[in-house]
Amino acid sequence: MQLVLASDLAVVREKYIEVITHTKDMNIHARWIYGQHPTDAMIQVLWVNEKRNGGYYVMSNLLGYKDLPFEILNQINNVVDIWRRHLGDNLIGVYLHGSIALNAFHPNSGDIDILVVVRDSLEVVTKLEIAGDIIEIDRSPRPLEMSAVKQIDAKNWKTPGNCVFHYSDFWTEKYLERFRNPDTEVYVADHEFPDADVTGYIKLLKQCGIVLYGEEIQEVFADVSDEDFWSAISADIEDYDFHDYDARYLTSNVLILGRILSFKKEKRILSKYEGGLWMINTVPEDLKYLPELAMKVWFEGEEHMLPEADLKRLRDYLVGEIKS
């Protein structure tokens, strides 16, 4: 992020249209604005008042779907093609959620988040074939994460729901081991299973999701109440661990925990970027540097150490606020 002097605000406002303003009685006001022309990448401006040097932080490389580079669009299209090829008429739709839908995708750190809706249950062999094809294009260039649910469940979703398929990098090696040894169990392929996370995916799809293929979102998915969503994202919060999954997700997990608390206060799903800004303003003064560093690591690729003692204090503060 670069600091633009307050006197330059007129230049920013000439080029960009402010479409959403998130303001509260706080020293930092986040404004989300989009370029007026297709060639303008979306930027996000964080206004910092005179107490924070009277300037503007400009993040110029956060993208929405229409701004994605060709190689990422091509990867997304390949995902759709895989599902269409394997399922044919059993495929109801393929839907994009996550940071791309929130216009907050960073091409060097963001994942591609997809929810698939199918008409009927899938055979295990079909799920393994799909997983094999997905692995071929995973991380080329971005990591892929996707789940699949049946149409009847999507239309009548109740947490924790029922999934028929899941893929993420956590499961990559397990799928590969299955291909090497057919006796290896892959739980998310061999079974249908509950997954409370899908409640959040559906809630976000209804807020700002993107149809990649198939029927319209409003026709396919149930409404998710704020109460049901909050129950899903705050369940087992006492066990939340910043170090879950691969080490690269540490800073992402920090920002996600802040997002959970932000929904309790704001009743709106924020992106990791927006949640980071929100958290900087919300956490105790001596902990503000942690979300600031997390954003620099996750969004800008910088390398920083986040002290374990302070991470524990931040986690305890956020979890305590979520539970209160």
Image (cartoon, rainbow, N blue to C red):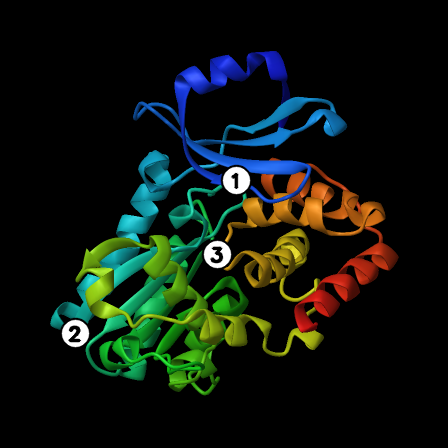
Which residue corresponds to the image point at 45% horizontal and 67% vertical from the top-left? Answer: 200
List x then y, in percent, for residue 116: 30, 67
Left or right of 296 on screen, residue 259:
left
Q: Which of pointers 1 and 3 lies earlier in the amino acid sequence? A: 1
In the rendered image, the residue lying farthest to the left is 89
Q: Amino acid at mark 3?
A: Arg
Q: Which residue is mark 1?
A: 108
Distance (Cα) linking label 1 and label 2: 34 Å
Q: Amino acid at mark 1?
A: Asn
Asked if residue 306 is positioned above or below residue 173 in the image, the reply reads: above
Is label 1 in contact with label 3 (beta carbons under 8 Å)?
no
List x then y, in percent, for residue 111: 47, 52
Nearer mark to the viewer, of 2 and 3: 3
List x then y, in percent, for residue 277: 63, 43
> Does residue 86 appear anywhere in the picture?
no
Q: Which residue is mark 3?
A: 268
List x then y, in percent, for residue 97: 38, 56
Crowd band around label 1 with a 10 angstrom C-alpha radius: few (<14), some (14–19), many (20+): some
Of residues 268 and 76, the one nearer the viewer is 268
Of residues 305 and 37, the one nearer the viewer is 37
Of residues 136 and 144, the one nearer the viewer is 144
Distance (Cα) linking label 1 and label 3: 26 Å
Asked if residue 60 is positioned above or below residue 92 in the image, the reply reads: above
Q: Which residue is mark 2?
A: 90
Nearer mark to the viewer, of 1 and 3: 3
Which residue corresponds to the image point at 80% horizontal and 51% vertical from the top-left? Answer: 284
Left or right of 240 on screen, residue 228:
left
* SS at circle 2: helix
* SS at circle 1: loop
Asked if residue 253 is positioned above or below residue 44 in the image, the reply reads: below
